[in-house]
Amino acid sequence: MAITGVTQHNISVIGADEGYISMSKTSRPQMIINVLQANPGNQFTARQLAQKIIETYKDELTEKRNNTRFASDEDFLNQITAEIGGSRTVKAKAMCTQVMTRDKPRPRLYYWGEDLVETTQIMPLSDMTPVSSVETMSFTEHALYPLLIEYLSEEEELLCRRIDEKRSSNNKGLGANHWLYPDIVALQPLDKGWDTVVQNCVRHSEGRLTRLWSLR
């Protein structure tokens, strides 16, 4: 007997007569749903929600975190933040109508809505407890890089990476790399929300699916 099924806990049973059970990982949209559901009454920015997801699903995300393209925890946090700001939240909303976002005023906030089936009364946003954010203060230039990356990830939905000129080599002496590279580079997906047919058409016609940003 061969049984294939997926339960609410993401358990797949294939070839049950052989006694084989495969545990599948939680999808990113489901992580968004689960974390928001576990924190009703709280509002999160994309970065704060990403941090909560990393804390909650640390074991499941270990393999992804160990990818060599993430040089630091900050890089990994930026990646999860960009995923939340992109199509993952759209899918989470399609899967669960109680996943809510508030776009204005900025920054965008993510929260768990009231059960629309059991009650028509929606919790006012003013009654929700916002998660603490960074207070206004003076910053050095290098301290501003993570803040700029956070803003670009949340507001422009860009995948950002920091360029560290100190790790580059040159043959023109001390300080020659100071203006050689941008401080931050970013990729913007242009095909988000496109139909698969359109994506394939652009790809085969050598059109652009991404835009490269360079920031100083």
Image (cartoon, rainbow, N blue to C red):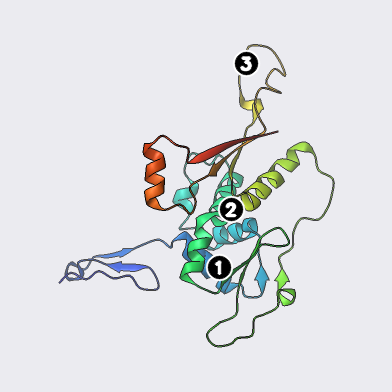
Identify the residue at horizontal 36%, vertical 38% (top origin).
204
> As shown in the figure, which amino acid type bears the numbered disc 3?
Asn
Q: Quadrant of the N terminus?
A: bottom left
Crowd class of label 1 (few under 14; some 14 to 19; many from 20; radius 10 Å) = some
**Residue 8 figure quarter:** bottom left
In the image, residue 13 above or below residue 58: below
The reply to whether residue 57 is in sight is: no
Residue on which disc 1 sits: 35
Q: Nearer the viewer, residue 84 or 135?
A: 84
**Mark 3, secondary structure of its residue:** loop
Q: Nearer the viewer, residue 125 or 179?
A: 125
Residue on which disc 2 sits: 81
Q: Where residue 187 sits: x, y (%)?
A: 55, 40
Q: Where residue 32 sits: x, y (%)?
A: 53, 64
User: What is the spatial separation of the Cα atoms under label 1 and label 3, in whole angstroms?
Assistant: 47 Å
Identify the residue at horizontal 25%, vertical 69% (top origin).
4
> As shown in the figure, which amino acid type bears the numbered disc 2?
Thr
On screen, residue 106 versus residue 17, left or right, reads right
Query: Which of the marked residues, 2 or 1, is nearer the chain's N terminus?
Result: 1
Residue on which disc 3 sits: 170
User: What is the spatial separation of the Cα atoms under label 2 and label 1, in whole angstroms?
Assistant: 14 Å
